[in-house]
Image: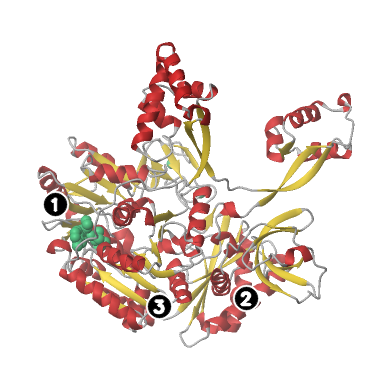
Amino acid sequence: MAYYADIILPLSLPKPYTYGVLESQEKHLKTGMRVAVPFGKTKVYTGIVAKIHQDKPALYEVKYIEEILDETPIVTLKQLEIWQWIAAYYLCNIGEVLKAALPSALLLESETVVELNKEKEIQVEELSDQEYLIYEALQQKSILKVQEIMGILGLKKVLPIIQAMATKDVVVINQELYKQYKPKLVRYVKISEAYRDQEQLTAFLATIQKAAPKQYEVMLSYFSIEASTKKPITPKQLAEAAKTTPSTIKSLVSKGVLDEYYLQHDRMGFQGDTASSSPVLTPHQTAAFEAINTAFLDKNVCLLHGVTSSGKTEVYVKLIEAQLQQDKQVLFMVPEIGLTTQLIARLQRYFGEEVQVYHSRNSVNERVETYQHVLTQTKGKIVIGTRSAVFLPFKNLGLIIVDEEHETTYKQYDPAPRYNARDISVLLAQKFNAKVLLGSATPSLESYDNAKKEKYALVELTKRYGNVLPPAIQLVDLKQKYKRKQMTGHFSDTLLQEMKTCLGEGKQVILFQNRRGYSPILECNTCGFSPQCPNCDVSLTYHKHNHSLRCHYCGYHIAMQLQCMGCGSTEISTKGFGTEQIETELKSVFKDYKIARMDLDTTRGKYACEKIISEFEQQQIDILVGTQMLAKGLDFRNVALVGIMNADTLLNYPDFRAHERCFQLLVQVSGRAGRTKEQGKVLIQSFNPNHQILQQVTTNQYAKMAEEQLYERKNFKYPPSYKLIRVVVKHKDYNAVNEAADWLTKAYQNAFKEYVLGPEFPPVMRIRNAYIKYILIKVPPAYSLQKTKAYLERINISFSAIGAFRKIRLNVNVDPY
Ligand code: ADP
Ligand code: ZN
Ligand code: ZN
């Protein structure tokens, strides 16, 4: 009987596609391997074998697998199960999950390539000028990719030219699978076989000693390096040791004295020193460590609620150590990599080469290397990674730590799958019978609720390391300060005074403002006009340093306008303020201090963020102004004061999570103050100092905040009590969006009654020229989420079948953030 294979393709298809397995492939093919399969008229894709079976598809004639691309499976059965779960839970296609899960370099793509037709005598004079250029290039390089031909001709549209050449039989057009991943090869030198012979060598050295002293120096350096290390020697290292240039080494290679050779090399490697022993836990930390171990005896997930600077990392280190002793793999999830250099360095100090780092800023090749190390367990049992690390092919996982588990970056917005890596980590752990530790000083209400309901265990660490007191938090009433004219720019006299004292004592200051740029709104005093983004429904933000007006949603920018674009008046004022304006004001008040800014604009380069952090650490910066990036687990030793410029924008954000978020952000930012010995100080400026959330922040009442918020969420039917599904309708035509959203809302209401909210435009209703409308479906705890989703999908399918709605983009976000 013939065999068939269901193949997952990296496309938005509702189901895997079934292909025929050739007899010659039967023995070799296994689930989880990559295969090249034809799809559509001419395309070849890399797919993953999801299932091998003997059920011939009834409805279509199968095509056959063209090539098996792996010797052994690169996707495990557990991964396949998780992919299926994600597709079902988040209502997306499994192909979309595949694309998110595998490093892109593992998915080979077919490419159109052109070769000369060897069977044909080519009459050069019959070729046009462009054709001749291609012909000439093909004579030098037998195969050309379309991309390369575009480069040669300096043209975008080259296919018609190639096709014309194919019709004349000058060239043949082919599809070739193009392998993206290339192992990195490092060049080394060693002494050649012939000169290993002592006599030969001595003779040679004698000839060059006078004639070529530099080469002589290189040879001596070579022997001295060889004597001191067994490691291979690079040309660069040798040139440096001999204080000469690589060309000297090249001459020795061409003389046949030195041989060049190549070794495959990992792109990332740890080269520092490791500490000899792990940290000694304080009694509080020991108690927490033991409580976690006890909790894991009967619960799979434990929430570690540890105040800022309580030393959660030290507890993690002990837990990781225990896993390594059992030879288990550990996944350590972090919200963002740029802000994690400190943590990575700390873990590397303890675990050295066992630590691997996996995130989207790695190059495609680095990602493949880590993927393969995890799969084969050849290196590094500990993986530190951002959300996509939950997709790695673990074989022997013992523990997942989700640090700063309340962070929203664990949820992927766009594109599908819109998954939450914290939630997936619980599922992933289940597959291995492994444990999950969620850590935070301000747990998400979802996790806290699970702990209160005893679904998760709860362990608390209430004391800071070294028994340092939590920072003293004071509110500053901006209404009063403005009335009494005690403001300098956006600084109250209280804040300025505290800053002066702090800086005078040689301490550092952190200032938090949740907006980047100089000022978000530019307004004409005469006619009230303010420049808007032409593509999005927002005002342009003024950026002073490059005199531009920028859209933070689509990147559109124009030069700063000195005259009103509406009436030509020069009376223009700015409203609102961002980090850049704070920085400017600071520079005029604190002339003698070094001031730096950390926000999206100053951290774009690969290591920009790391640079600011390390300069601040080494106290080359006195005052650091920044956005919420500052709230993410950074550990600075010398910060005595944290100032929050304005807490109100956080409180007034139109979202049901705004209060929870505001609390988390303020507590996290405050936690950067006073991490050693002396108590730190925090000043929060606000027009609403009596707001209950601000009061709860100053008195450090997480539990009270959580209980109040959970009560409100339940009353107003929001998570975690109710589940949410958000349907997003998008189109560039305003009326089309409205009609589509109305149709869908009616259909949903028929099914889910009063549990449908909307349709409603979000605060920014147009982004990149597309109008956006939301419909929200609330799923009560007693309802089956699965049935609700099945129903929803059926409605969405009917929707897509309506001709008038064909162009509408529809996406579904389960558990939106
Ligand atoms: P958290 O992550 O809970 O905010 P950290 O793990 O960053 O706290 O710890 C705060 C600081 O205290 C760090 O600089 C850390 O090195 C130090 N620290 C915590 N526990 C210990 C310990 N047991 N021994 C030595 N230093 C510790
Ligand atoms: Zn005007
Ligand atoms: Zn825009």
Q: Amino acid at mark 2?
A: Glu
N-terminal label among 3 and 2: 3
Please tell me the numbered disc located at residue 494. Answer: 1
- Which image quadrant: the C terminus? bottom left
Q: Is residue 390 above or below residue 108?
A: below
Q: Residues within 10 Å of mark 1 (few under 14, many from 20)?
A: some
Whether label 3 touches label 1, CB < 8 Å: no
Q: Amino acid at mark 3?
A: Pro
Label 2 sits on a secondary structure element that is: helix
573 or 316: nearer the eye?
316
Residue 349 image position (x, y, % from top left): 29, 53
- Ligand 1 is within 8 Å of the C-beta of the residue at disc 3: no
Residue 119 image position (x, y, % from top left): 88, 37
In the rendered view, does 468 fall on the left or right side of 128?
left
**Comparing marks 2 and 1, which lies closer to the viewer?**
2
Q: Which residue is mark 2?
A: 793
**Quadrant of the image occupied by residue 688:** bottom left
Residue 32 image position (x, y, % from top left): 61, 66
> Which residue of the protein is positioned furthest toward the top in this rendering?
211
N-terminal label among 2 and 1: 1
State the separation of the CA atoms marked 3 and 2. Answer: 23 Å
**Comparing marks 3 and 1, which lies closer to the viewer?**
3
State the separation of the CA atoms marked 3 and 1. Answer: 40 Å
Identify the residue at horizontal 32%, vertical 61% (top origin). 650
Q: Which residue is mark 3?
A: 720
Label 3 sits on a secondary structure element that is: loop
**Quadrant of the image occupied by residue 293:** bottom left
